[in-house]
Amino acid sequence: MRKQYTFQRVLLSAYDTQLVGKYSDKADTVMVEIDSSLKSFSIQLPDFMSSVGKQFAFKNLGANAVTLLTKNGQYIDYPGTFTKLVAAYSFYSVASNAFDKWLSLETNATLPPSAHDLDTHADWKPYDSVNAHGQMICCNSDGLWEKLSAGDVGKVLKIVATDTPGWADESDGGASAVALALFEHDEAVGISTGETGIPISAELNGKSLTVLTANVAVAGSGSTTDIIVRRHRGGLDVSMMNSATKIASGAYTSSNGVPNPVNDDVATGDLLFVDVTATNTVSPLGLSVVLSFA
């Protein structure tokens, strides 16, 4: 039968001087949260021979340093020390090698600023609370581990709010693109106002224009060919670009335009028009564009 590993969380204060008696012998990993807000103090580790296979992870959540002491002159690492200082607001992990010493796993890793308050750790859950297929453990914006519910068919993991992971529809998070030919491959590109509108469907609703890529079949020369996108909504037209996509002399493609963050969004029922506002001195031939949304 496969061994089931268990996790236990304990809290020690300045009135606790040793770990023995504070945790279950059945626990493989013991998270020891230390409240050092009152003062500095020392905690004695158990005998490593009685801790075979165990790992102790110490989180100092207070403003004072805490000293870990070994029993009977046992080493932490070798050649090593008989004591270990866990600085204020830091993390240290140690495990028994069941032979001759304790082994340091991580030393004085600084905790996230918001993880110093003991109250923020009230909702810590043991790892074995993940007990269903599809569940995941993620670190939230406070530096705490939290369990996500099982995902559903067609859902993807994405940031659904600031620093908050969650399951969402795949169609909501993917990128989309629309292509349009404005001039035939042997037709000279000229200044023009788009006459054929690109309708925005429900699949693009709520997305924003991220890139306008333009390509010509035969490069022009001199000056630049400039292309913008215009959005028609509710009888009003606005430019979706802060600056046009410009195809340089002798170039065949460009995506250097910058969308306008105020007007780059699209909604169901919008019409988008592509305008050519300038051309190379010697016009290129053939013009196609790709509008990318995310």
Image: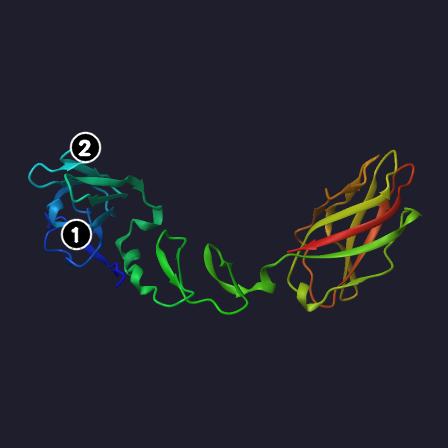
- Seen from this angle, which residue lies furthest top? 79
Going by the numbered disc 2, the residue's amino acid type is Tyr
Going by the numbered disc 1, the residue's amino acid type is Leu
* Nearer the observer, 186 or 38: 186
Q: Which residue is mark 2?
A: 78
Q: Quadrant of residue 73?
A: top left
Q: Is residue 175 left or right of residue 252?
A: left
* Nearer the observer, 190 or 104: 104
Q: Which residue is mark 1?
A: 12
User: What colouring does the structure picture have?
Assistant: rainbow
Q: Earlier in the sequence, mark 1 or mark 2?
A: 1
Q: Is residue 133 above or below residue 285?
A: below
Q: Residue at x 82, y 61 (%)?
A: 197
Badge 1 vs badge 2, beta-carbon distance below 8 Å:
no
What is the CA distance from the residue labelled 1 to the residue labelled 2?
Answer: 27 Å
Indicate the secondary structure of the residue bearing disc 2.
loop
Indicate the secondary structure of the residue bearing disc 1.
strand
- Seen from this angle, which residue lies furthest front? 1
